[in-house]
Image (cartoon, rainbow, N blue to C red):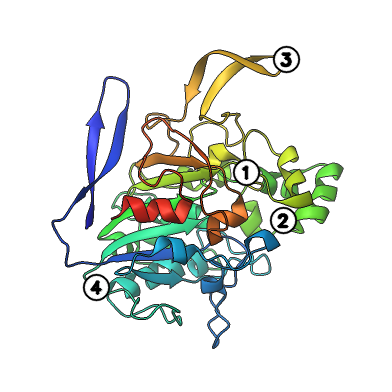
C-alpha cells in the first residue's frame, strides 16, 4: 500500500499526516538506509560490510543480536544499504563529494533497480525501479539528508553540488536522487548538530576528560561540522524547501550502564549523544530544554510551571518540510539496531500515532503499510 500525504490546516499550525490507500498495491516498499557517523561504509569486502552491519551491530551488550531490519521489513518489503565513509580518520563533512555526492549517486543506482551491492540475509529484497521509495537515516545521516534534499531544487545555494578535497565544486545528482522519494525518516538525527561535538571541538578541560572516557573523538572536519553553531548547520546551507518531506523521530533515553553518565553533561533531553531538540529539527538552540512533551516551560528552582512558551510544532521548525513524528524512550545505539523492541513514548503535537509502542523501525513499518 502506498503512503499518502495530506496537509491539515488550522489557524495556528500546518501539519502533515500519513494516510493509507490501496491505489498501487503492485508496488513494494523500498527503504533506502543511510547510516550515521563513524562508519567506513565505502567498504564492501565479502562478509565485511560495515554499512549493512551498522544497522545490527551494537555497542552495548544489552542489544546484541538485535537487527533494525527485522523490525522494519514486512514480507514484501525491499531495502537498499547506502554506504559512505563517515569515519573520524577520513574526516569528511556532510557537504563533501565523498559523503553527499556518494550517497546521491548510490540512491540513483538503487532507484534504477541496480541493487546495492550488499549480501542481504533476506532473500529477494533488492529494490526494484517501480518500488515505493523511502529514506531511513540515522544520526549524521539526517544532516546529510537536509543538505542534499535542500539543494535538490533549482535556485538552492548549492544546487546539485558537493565539494572536493581542494574545495572545488563537483556536480552531483541530488535532483535525480530525490525524485520519487515519498518521505525521509530521521532517527536521532543531528539536524541541528550535537553538543557532544561542541565539547570535543571547543570544550573545557572537563569536557576533554569526558571525551576521553566516553567518546574518544578528535575535532576533525567531520566532527567540526556536526557542531550546533549556526555556521555549521546544513539547514543554513539550503534553499527554501526540501525535495522530500522529513519525518523526525527523537530518542530521550540515556545509554545503559556507566556510559549513561554522558547524558548528565548534555543540555535538556537527549539520547545519550544528541540533544532531543536537534533530533526533532526544532528551531532555536539545539540544546534548549524541551521536557518530555517537546514544550518549554518557565521554571522556578528547576520546577516547571505555567503554560508552555515554545512548542516544537510544525510552525516552529528550523528546516522546511520537516514534521515531528514521535518522541521515543530509546538511546542512540538502540535507534539504529532496534535494540529496544517496545519503548515507551511521549505523544507529540501533530505527531503520528501509527506504530505507538513500537521502536523506531516498527513505527516506520506501521506508518508505511
**Mark 1 and mark 2: Cα distance apart in space:** 26 Å
Residue 252 versus residue 257: which sits nearer the camera? 257
Specify whether residue 242 is in view: yes
Check whether the beta carbons of the residues at disc 2 and disc 4 lie within 8 A of each other. no
Nearer the N terminus, badge 4 or badge 1? 4
Q: Nearer the viewer, mark 1 or mark 2?
A: 1
Q: Residue 168: x, y in percent?
A: 49, 65
Above or below, comparing residue 160 to residue 261 in the picture:
below
4 or 1: mark nearer the eye? 1
Tell me which label, 3 or 4, sits earlier in the chain.
4
Give the spatial CA distance, label 3 vs label 2.
36 Å
In the rendered structure, find residue 219 and report the number of the disc placed on it: 2
Alpha carbons under labels 3 and 4: distance apart: 57 Å
Q: Which of disc 2 and disc 1 is earlier in sequence?
A: 2
Labels 1, 3: front one = 1
The outermost residue toward the bottom is 46
Which numbered marker is on residue 151? none
In the image, residue 313 lies at what x, y percent? Answer: 41, 30
Secondary structure found at label 3: loop
- The mark closer to the camera, 3 or 2, is 3
State which tag comes first along the sequence, 2 or 4: 4
Q: Which mark is residue 253?
A: 1
Residue under numbered circle 4: 129
Residue 223 lies, in percent from the top left, at 65, 55
Circle on res. 301: 3
Name the front one of labels 3 and 4.
Answer: 3
Amino acid at each position: 500500500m502506498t503512503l499518502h500525504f495530506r496537509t491539515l490546516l488550522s489557524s495556528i499550525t500546518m501539519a502533515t499526516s500519513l494516510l493509507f490507500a490501496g491505489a498501487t498495491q503492485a508496488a513494494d516498499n523500498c527503504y533506502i538506509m543511510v547510516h550515521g557517523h563513524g562508519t567506513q561504509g565505502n567498504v564492501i569486502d565479502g562478509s565485511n560490510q560495515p554499512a549493512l552491519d551498522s544497522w545490527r551491530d551494537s555497542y552495548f551488550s544489552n542489544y546484541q543480536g538485535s537487527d533494525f531490519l527485522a523490525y522494519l521489513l514486512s514480507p514484501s518489503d525491499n531495502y537498499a544499504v547506502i554506504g559512505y565513509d563517515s569515519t573520524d580518520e577520513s574526516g569528511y563533512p556532510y557537504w563533501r563529494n565523498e559523503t553527499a555526492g556518494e550517497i546521491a549517486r548510490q540512491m540513483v543506482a538503487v532507484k534504477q533497480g541496480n541493487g546495492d551491492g550488499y549480501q542481504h540475509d533476506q532473500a529477494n529484497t533488492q529494490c526494484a525501479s517501480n518500488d515505493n521509495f523511502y529514506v531511513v537515516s540515522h544520526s549524521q545521516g539526517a544532516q546529510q539528508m537536509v543538505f542534499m534534499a535542500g539543494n535538490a531544487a533549482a535556485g538552492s545555494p548549492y544546487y546539485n553540488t558537493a565539494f572536493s578535497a581542494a574545495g572545488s565544486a563537483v556536480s552531483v545528482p541530488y535532483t535525480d536522487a530525490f525524485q520519487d522519494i515519498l518521505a525521509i525518516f530521521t532517527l536521532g538525527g543531528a539536524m541541528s548538530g550535537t553538543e557532544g561535538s561542541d565539547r570535543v571541538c571547543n570544550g573545557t578541560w572537563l569536557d576533554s576528560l569526558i571525551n576521553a572516557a566516553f567518546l574518544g573523538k578528535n575535532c576533525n572536519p567531520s566532527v567540526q561540522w556536526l557542531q550546533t553553531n549556526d555556521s555549521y548547520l546544513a539547514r543554513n546551507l539550503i534553499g527554501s524547501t526540501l525535495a522530500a518531506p522529513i519525518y523526525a523521530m527523537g530518542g530521550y533515553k540515556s545509554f545503559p550502564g556507566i556510559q549513561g553518565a554522558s547524558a548528565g553533561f548534555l543540555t535538556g533531553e537527549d539520547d545519550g549523544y544528541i540533544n532531543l531538540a536537534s533530533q526533532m529539527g526544532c528551531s532555536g538552540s539545539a540544546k534548549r530544554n524541551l521536557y518530555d512533551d517537546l514544550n518549554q516551560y518557565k521554571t522556578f528552582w528547576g520546577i516547571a510551571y505555567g503554560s508552555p512558551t515554545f512548542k516544537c510544532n510544525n510552525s516552529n521548525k528550523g528546516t522546511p518540510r520537516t514534521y515531528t513524528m514521535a518522541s521515543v524512550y530509546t538511546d542512540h545505539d538502540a535507534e539504529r539496531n532496534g535494540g529496544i523492541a517496545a519503548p515507551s513514548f511521549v505523544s507529540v503535537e501533530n505527531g503520528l500515532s501509527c506504530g505507538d509502542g513500537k521502536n523506531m523501525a516498527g513505527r516506520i513499518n506501521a506508518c508505511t503499510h
